[in-house]
Image: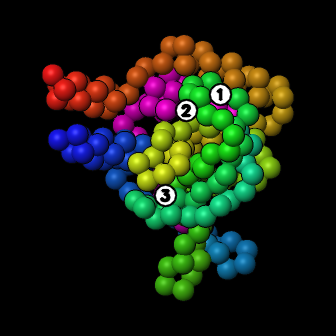
């Protein structure tokens, strides 16, 4: 029964974070023969409310992107990056972690596409971001598309984003999916 609950949880997390799938809505020619393909994400929570964004996350932290390390298509196209954790807001990450970002490069019928969600550009090595992520059942930390990778421009910007998300964490609104799973596990153990 517990594995069934885990499967239901994984479905809700994936459906809630990134929607039912990609909607390719527009392509544009890019240098080198690569075209952009834009997708939309459907969210089951208010991504513009930092308290709900933090509530869906397992980890909120500042990190520096070291390098792109690969891609995976399980359960959909994701680009993987090694990220050095610099400071935690929520969670206790240390060292270097793998962050998965929805989208990436894909060859379709002989053409190379860069598939991204809205204007959520792929992470850049040597840049520092504030990350909002969930631990993925498929490995790594899945960032919330568009709203889970905030580029940090300088020390002043870093401090402002840290304070903003520390306030949100102090007032977080926990995910209803996490509550549902916790209730089911508690009932099963009773």
Mark 2 vs 1: CB contact within 8 A: yes
Locate residue 27 relative to residue 65 in the image: left or right: left
Q: In which quadrant is the N terminus drawn?
A: top left
According to the picture, the residue beneath numbered tag 1 turns out to be: 88
Q: Residue at x 42, y 43 (%)?
A: 17
Classify 10 Å Cα crowding around label 2: few (below 14), some (14-19), many (20 and above): many
N-term mark: 2 or 1: 2
CA gap, disc 2 and disc 1: 8 Å
Cα separation between marks 2 and 3: 25 Å
Secondary structure at numbered mark 2: strand
Disc 1 on helix, strand or loop? Answer: strand
Residue located beneath label 2 in the image? 59
Of residue 169 and residue 44, the one placed in the foreground of this image is 169
> Where is mark 3, residue-wise?
39
Which class describes the residues within 10 Å of circle 3: few (<14), some (14-19), or many (20+)? many
The answer to whether residue 145 is visible is no
Query: Mark 1 or mark 3, which is nearer to you?
Result: 1
Q: Is residue 18 magenta?
A: no
Residue 62 shown left or right of residue 101 in the figure = right
Residue located 60% across and 49% down the image: 98
Rendered-image quadrant of the C terminus: top left
Q: Which residues are magenta?
A: 37-62
* Mark sitting on residue 98: none
């Amino acid at each position: 029964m517990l594995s069934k609950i885990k499967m239901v949880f994984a479905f809700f997390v994936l459906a809630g974070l990134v929607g039912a799938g990609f909607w390719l809505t527009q392509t544009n020619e890019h240098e080198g023969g690569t075209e952009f393909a834009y997708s939309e994400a459907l969210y089951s929570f208010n991504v513009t409310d930092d308290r709900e964004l933090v509530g869906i996350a397992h980890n909120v932290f500042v990190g520096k992107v070291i390098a792109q390390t690969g891609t995976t298509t399980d359960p959909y196209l994701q680009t993987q990056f090694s990220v050095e954790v610099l400071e935690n807001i929520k969670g206790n990450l240390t060292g270097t972690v793998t962050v998965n970002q929805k989208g990436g490069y894909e060859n379709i019928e002989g053409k190379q596409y860069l598939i991204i969600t809205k204007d959520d550009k792929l992470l850049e090595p040597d840049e520092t971001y504030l990350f909002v992520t969930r631990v993925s059942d498929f490995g790594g930390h899945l960032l919330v598309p568009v709203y889970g990778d905030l580029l940090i421009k300088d020390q002043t910007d870093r401090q402002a984003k840290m304070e903003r998300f520390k306030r949100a964490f102090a007032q977080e609104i926990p995910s209803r999916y996490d509550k549902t799973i916790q209730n089911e596990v508690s009932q099963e153990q009773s």
